[in-house]
Structures are given as structure tokens and as C-alpha cells.
Image: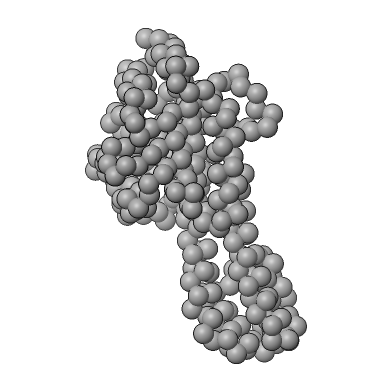
Amino acid sequence: MPTSSSIREARRDLGQRLRALRQQHGFTARELARRCGWHESKCSRIENGHAAASAADIESWTRVCGEETAAADLIATARGIDGMYIEWRSMERAGLKHAQESVLPLWDQTRRFKAYAQSLVPGPLQTQAYTRAVLAGIRERRQLSDEIEAAVETRLDKQKFLTEGGRQFAIVLEETVLYRRVGPPAVMVEQLSRLLEATVLASVSLGIIRRDADRSVMPAVEDFWIFDDRQVNVELVSAYLTVKQSHEVKHYTDDFTRLTDLAVHGGPVLTLIASAINSYA
């Protein structure tokens, strides 16, 4: 499944559009580079996705080709690619509360959510104590100085989407999530009880992949969210990845289908959660 390679793919797609523009006007890569005042290898690196095209690069490229009106759209695409990969230190510079608020517009616009988790219970299904433990861990691990209570409230505010606007949530968890402790056992018992409550919500479909499931076709992967099958957000160790390229999004939707097929639903889910609760008791 793609991670930072998505950025290279997006750059390559932009590069192909620039290549088509160059070829349409009969320029070789060497000639276009000369007219732009660049090293002759620069065109090739941009066209093959090995280098990012800046706004100035695109303006020069389109000017040489006599296609200045195409510049604005190409620059907007390039800036979208730059925003795909945001380091946590940049996203959280204004604090954890701001980082939580930054995704709310996307959630407000979305009607069909798909989420896969192999590390943590997804945010909308978290209890306050579990959320507090998660954010406290992030604060310590990333050496942030802000208070977390405001961030906790902002994150919990996402739970309104479970019952508002006719939204649908398809969520698949690895069974290991039930046993990965985040806080004292009492916090985990409360959190798992919250999962049981979520199974009766009309807006939520919850599946769990057993620990002994055959993973030969579909291994565990990084946690991700899919929004209306048009955008994917992935939480990497060092950064927050946004995927919008249609063929890249399809990788995630296809793998989500495979993960869903691996999971159990209905009664077996209740049994797995109850067993995990008993293990903490």
C-alpha cells in the first residue's frame, strides 16, 4: 500500500502533463531547459517525478511553450502535491487543539467514512479517558508543551458525526487493538464497553480481524481513513499523508475491501470484545 510514494506518483502525473505540453510544441527536453535557463537534466527530473516543480518552474515552462493560460491550473496541482505530506512538527506547531480542528471541515463535508486501525481505536469511538491517554502520549513523544484538555474536547466533538447528517461509518479493527493498552486497565474496560455500545448504532458497521486470520493476501498496514472514496488520510510515524490521486485512492479502497472481507461482523464481534474486557477484569 502506498505511503510517501504517493507524492512521487502525483509528481509524475504532473510531470506527464508538462511533458505533453512540451511535446505538443515540438521542444526536446534539452531545448526547453536551455530556453528556461536550466541545467539540461532538470526537465527530465520534473517529468519523471524525481523533482518538484515550483510555481516559477511552471511559469517558465508554460511561457516557453506559449501556454501561459495553463500555468494557474498546473501551479494549483503542484501546490496540492506539496500539501500531501505534512510533518507532525509543522501540523502541531500551533498546538494539538489546532491540529484536531484542522480536519473538521473535511469531516463536515463527508458522508461515507471508512476506517482501518491496527494500532488504536479510531477517534469517533474513543472515550474521553482513552483520548486523553492517546494525546498525552503524543505530547510526550513529540515533546509538545501545550495542554491537552482543549484538544481532547475538540477530538471528542467528532463523535457528533456518528449521529448527525445521515453519515455512515465502516470501521475495521485488528483484534490486537483490543489488547493494546492505552492507560490503566480501567480505561481499557471503559473503552471496550464503548465499542460494544457503538455496534448498535445504525450509522456504524464494525468489523474485527481475528489475530489468527490468514494474512497471506492482506497483511496489517498503517491506520488510515477514507472520505467518500475520494481522499485518504494516513498517519505515518513522522507525518500526516493526504492522498487524492484517484488511482492511489483506489489502492486504499481495494485494500479496505480485502480487510473487510477478512473481518468478522455481528455476533462474533461482540464475543471478541467481551473476551478482551474479561482479560482486563
Residue displayed at 33% across by 29% down: 201
Would residue 227 be seen by someone viewing this image from the given angle? yes
Q: Position of residue 87 (x, y in %)?
A: 47, 53
Would residue 140 be seen by someone viewing this image from the given angle? no
Count of all numbered marks drawn on residues in the image: 0
**252 shown above or below 42:** above
**18 shown above or below 277:** below
Q: Quadrant of the N terminus?
A: top right
Residue 36 or residue 197, whichever sits in front: 197
- Which image quadrant is residue 94 in? bottom left
Residue 263 or residue 43, whichever sits in front: 263
Residue 51 or residue 62, whichever sits in front: 62
**147 shown above or below 17:** above
**200 shown above or below 155:** above
Residue displayed at 49% across by 64% down: 80
Answer left or right for 59 relative to 138: right
Residue displayed at 67% across by 76% down: 20
Residue displayed at 35% across by 34% down: 203
Q: Position of residue 132 (x, y in %)?
A: 31, 33
Please name the colour scheme applied to the rendered image: one colour
Answer left or right for 79 relative to 183: right
Q: Position of residue 149 (x, y in %)?
A: 24, 39
Q: Position of residue 264 (x, y in %)?
A: 52, 22
- Which image quadrant is residue 135 in? top left
Q: Quadrant of the C terminus?
A: top left
